[in-house]
Amino acid sequence: MRTKRCGGAEILLLCAIVLSGCVLTDAHVNPGYTVQAGKKSPLSAIAPLTVAITVDDQRPQYEQDRVGNKKNNFGNITAKVISDTPPTSILYDALKAEFEASNHKVLKMEDGQADSVVKIGLKRYWSDFAMHWFDIEMMATLETDLAIFKGTGQEPLVAKPFNSNFRESRQIVLDGAFEDVLRGTLLEYVRSFSRDPHVLDALKSAAAEREKNRP
């Protein structure tokens, strides 16, 4: 029995089939965050705080209407990957859920006095893919500038870039693949945030200040 080997042209044709279907139609995604039931992050070891969170959209103008692009096998953009929820709200809601699951109270800046303020500049929330010989690599990134303040203090307790990345291999890329990797990098961002020693030290300092000023 003869075995037929695929040439380069046939591989490209296969990739075109794998990426076909709705390649010309915008993909709509909702990469939300869900706290894992029964699991506590290191945030729960900090005395309860009232935390204000702000997320400012600082993405490049050409990325503000999408979180990725669909492309054909020649690399040409054919459609957008659009988040039905603004990425700033996605990140805010994810961090809010993680803080509240750890017994902290979250409010908006205009809603009252906070023990600590978490300010985030969203630089990028993006999905992409790369075609290899035997699979398609999906990837997503979440890039921010992070600053944490004590109360209404002007000097941050911590200020630094804070990013996350997520990759996975697929045989077929449908719209859900973009949502999955965007959710994956969001989960990694929150996981890293809740375990970062500089973040934890800043929040512990805010908690200590609250106890010192308690009547």
Image: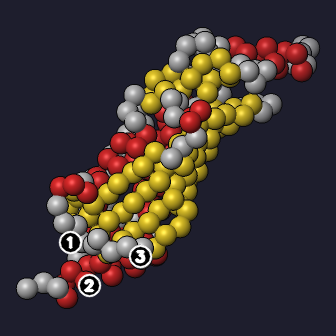
Q: Residue at x 23, y 76 (%)?
A: 47
**Residue 66 appears at what percent x and percent y?**
52, 30
Element under disc 1:
loop
Q: Amino acid at mark 1?
A: Pro
Query: Which dot marks residue 48?
Result: 1
**Foreground residue, 68 or 191?**
68
Relative vertical location of residue 83 with respect to residue 147 in this rendering, above or below: above
Q: Amino acid at mark 3?
A: Glu
Q: Position of residue 17 (x, y in %)?
A: 70, 13
Q: Are marks 3 and 1 in contact (CB under 8 Å)?
A: no
Label 3: which residue?
Answer: 155
The foreground one among 185 and 150 is 150
**Residue that badge 2 annotates:** 208
Which coloring applies here?
Answer: secondary structure
> Disc 1 or disc 2, which is closer to the eye?
2
Q: Quadrant of the N terminus?
A: top right
Q: Is residue 16 left or right of residue 151?
A: right
Real-space CA distance between mark 1 and mark 2, rounded to the nearest whole angstrom: 11 Å
- State the SS at label 3: loop
* Mark 1 burial class by Cα count in 10 Å: few <14, some 14-19, many 20+: some
Q: Residue 106 vs residue 83: left or right?
A: left
As displayed, is residue 11 above or below residue 195?
above
Is disc 2 surrounded by few (<14), some (14 to 19) or many (20+) residues within 10 Å?
some
